[in-house]
Amino acid sequence: MKYLNLGCGARFHPDWVNVDFVSSDPRVQRYDLRNGIPYPDGTFDVTYHSHVLEHFSKEAAGDFLRECRRVLSRNGINRVVVPDLERIARIYLQALEGCLVGDAVWKNRYDWILLEMYDQAVRDVSGGEMLAYVRKEPIPDREFVIERIGREFFNMIEPRAHRKSFRTGRAKLMVMRDAFSRKLARLIFGRQRIRSHDVGVFRESGEVHRNMYDRYSLSRALLEAGFASPRIVGPAESAIEGWSGLHLDTEPDGQVYKPDSLYMEANRP
């Protein structure tokens, strides 16, 4: 069996073919997936992508799914994981109702779930308001946030503690040079034009969400891309042989890696 993990980040299996926009490991091939998938037709038995599809526009997402279909063999499986818009919306409405009756618990949760709903679509700096929220001391209803985003909560915090210790002398020099260049550019072009340029560059960086999916819209997107029999599955549930032992959507202890997710599989006819 040949398996392909697309947009894998730092979470991949060494026995798979792993591809991402930026390589985090020698076992990860660097490739811009906006340009398609760099393999011949029918190469793989499984394609898998987690929290990738929402970073494409609706049109580009359709192209990407058709590329997944193209590189799959007949009856191959495409497993898609995205943030679950339906679940976010339901919790938001529950939080809203709680706030309106003065429930202190839901007042704290309201702020976070509202960020889940829109922050990654509107932010113009890396991390956005979600990162600022998890840096609060104390974090309001910390356990609720962890329940919602799982290991991602710790991924957002841990780099902050180690960022300075890994900065080399050369990296420090580059930071100082860039800071000087930006000051000079502001003098020539003005602060607002430089700010507009920075925001545009960031929003094309791939971090922002350009679309969100629920069980209906994701199923429809898969069908429109030529897949058959889209079905909701659990994080440890799959038609992929040995899935639960691969620990891509779950941790070795059984915890779900990204609990805020919708999981769906479909086959190439």
Image (spheres, helix red, strand yellow):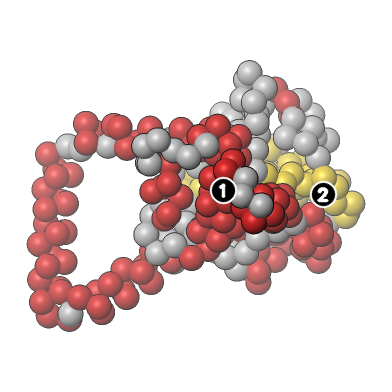
> What residue is at 44 percent from the left and 38 percent from the top?
139
Q: Residue 44 vs residue 124: left or right?
A: right
Tell me if residue 239 comes above or below residue 213 in the rendering. Answer: above
Residue highlighted by disc 1: 107
User: Which of these two is toward me, 22 or 132?
Assistant: 132
Q: Estimate how packed mark 1 is, as few (under 14), some (14 to 19) or many (20 or more) residues with alpha carbons within 10 Å.
A: some
Rendering coords of residue 130 (x, y %): 46, 50
Residue highlighted by disc 2: 266
Between the C-alphas of marks 1 and 2, the distance is 39 Å
Tell me if residue 46 comes above or below residue 220 in the rendering. Answer: above
Rendering coords of residue 110 (x, y %): 58, 51
User: Which of these two is toward me, 77 or 256?
Assistant: 256
Q: Nearer the viewer, mark 1 or mark 2?
A: 1
**Image disc number at residue 260:** none
**On the rendered image, what quadrant is the C terminus found in?**
bottom right
Identify residue type, mark 2. Ala
Quadrant housing residue 34: bottom right
Q: Estimate how packed mark 2 is, as few (under 14), some (14 to 19) or many (20 or more) residues with alpha carbons within 10 Å.
A: many
Tag 2's secondary structure? strand
Tag 1's secondary structure? helix
Q: Are marks 1 and 2 in contact (CB under 8 Å)?
A: no
**On the rendered image, what quadrant is the N terminus found in?**
top right
Quadrant housing residue 187: bottom left
Rendering coords of residue 153 (x, y %): 49, 37
> What residue is at 62 percent from the left and 45 percent from the top?
103
Identify residue type, mark 1. Lys
Residue sitting farthest toward the front? 102
Circle nearer the N terminus (1, 2): 1
User: Which of these two is toward me, 193 or 248?
Assistant: 193
